[in-house]
Amino acid sequence: MSSGSLIKHPRTQLAIKVAIGLSIALVAFWWFAIHPYISTDDARVAATLIRVAPEAIGGRIVKVAVTEGVRVKKGDLLVALNHEIPEAQLQRAKARALLTERELHRINELVSQKGLAPKELDIAKANADTAQAELKLAQSAFDNTTIESPVDGIVVQKIAEEGNILEPGQVAVTISDVDHAWIAANIEETSIGPVKVGQPVKIVIDEGGTLRGKVAEVRAAVASQFALIPSDSGSGNFTKVVQRVPIKIELEAHPDQVLRAGQSVEIKIRVH
């Protein structure tokens, strides 16, 4: 059979048509499903972690009001410290402030009647101001015996235990601000060029669920620049490695999706 006859054979023509159709389908698939997007699985949920600790005073823990995994609101009680000594100091400071205020008022009247020298009034004012400052310090110390949540969030770590001594600045509870979580991702430097702020992003959570967001930030440095031990090619042993550029993705509202700080996700950025 000649080559011309072979080409004209119905089966050959069908095969050619199928091949052309598949080629067109593959090109269309690439153009519409792959070309407009840049994707990576080097991404994870990021959230601010607030480590809550007493500011100025320590003490024995008398109550731990939360457990790990519970959601808290801003102002909710987390930990209560023994308040007997701070409360007594506060009462003493209040009494002294009241006494110096009355003394100031009495001396002011005597000075106005020329019964005392003006310098006595200055001393009384200084005593009253000192007493007010001591009252503020005592009030602050008493307020710090109750440690409250500074934000809405989820307790991810509870270190405090009833009966233990908590020192000033010692972390008692760690809260994750998951309501303001974002996606931290790393894009290969060979693909980062088309990525711009504001581009829409689809996020697929490994645990299950889908989110929407947009590119909020593209860093001006690669991820390796923030490593604790940066690579050093000064010795002459150099191997080129494709660097990754960190980006930040803001999330749209997701009231029905519970996020966990650090969980893995896959992202797809529409760049065309």
Image (cartoon, rainbow, N blue to C red):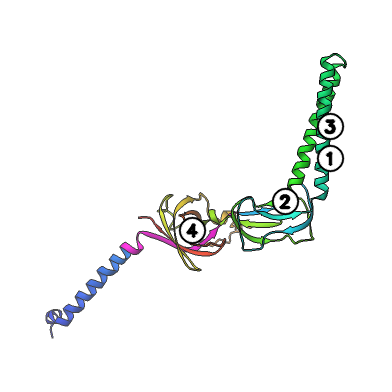
Q: Decide: marks 1, 4 in contact (CB < 8 A)? A: no
Amino acid of disc 1: Arg
| SS of the residue under disc 4 | loop
Lower position in the chain sequence, tag 4 or tag 2: 2
Residue on which disc 3 sits: 99
Residue 144 at x, y = what percent? 74, 48
Distance Cα–Cα, label 1 vs label 4: 49 Å
The mark lying in front, picked from 1 and 4, is: 1
Distance Cα–Cα, label 1 vs label 2: 20 Å
**Dot 1 alpha-carbon crowd within 10 angstroms: few under 14, some 14 to 19, many 20 or more:** some
Q: 226 and 60: which one is in front?
A: 60
Q: Is residue 101 above or below residue 24?
A: above
Q: Is residue 219 left or right of residue 168?
A: left
Distance Cα–Cα, label 3 vs label 1: 11 Å
**Dot 4 alpha-carbon crowd within 10 angstroms: few under 14, some 14 to 19, many 20 or more:** few
Q: 91 and 28: which one is in front?
A: 91
| SS of the residue under disc 1 | helix
The range drawn in magenta is 32-48
Residue 92 badge:
1
Q: 239 and 32: which one is in front?
A: 32
Distance Cα–Cα, label 4 vs label 3: 55 Å
Residue in the image at 49% along x and 62% along y: 257
Residue on which disc 4 sits: 255
Residue 115 badge:
none
Distance Cα–Cα, label 2 vs label 3: 28 Å
Q: Decide: marks 3, 1 in contact (CB < 8 A)? A: no
The mark lying in front, picked from 2 and 3, is: 3
Quadrant in the picture for residue 192: bottom left
Q: Decide: marks 4, 2 in contact (CB < 8 A)? A: no
Residue on which disc 2 sits: 146
Quadrant in the picture for residue 110: top right
Q: Is residue 218 left or right of residue 81?
A: left
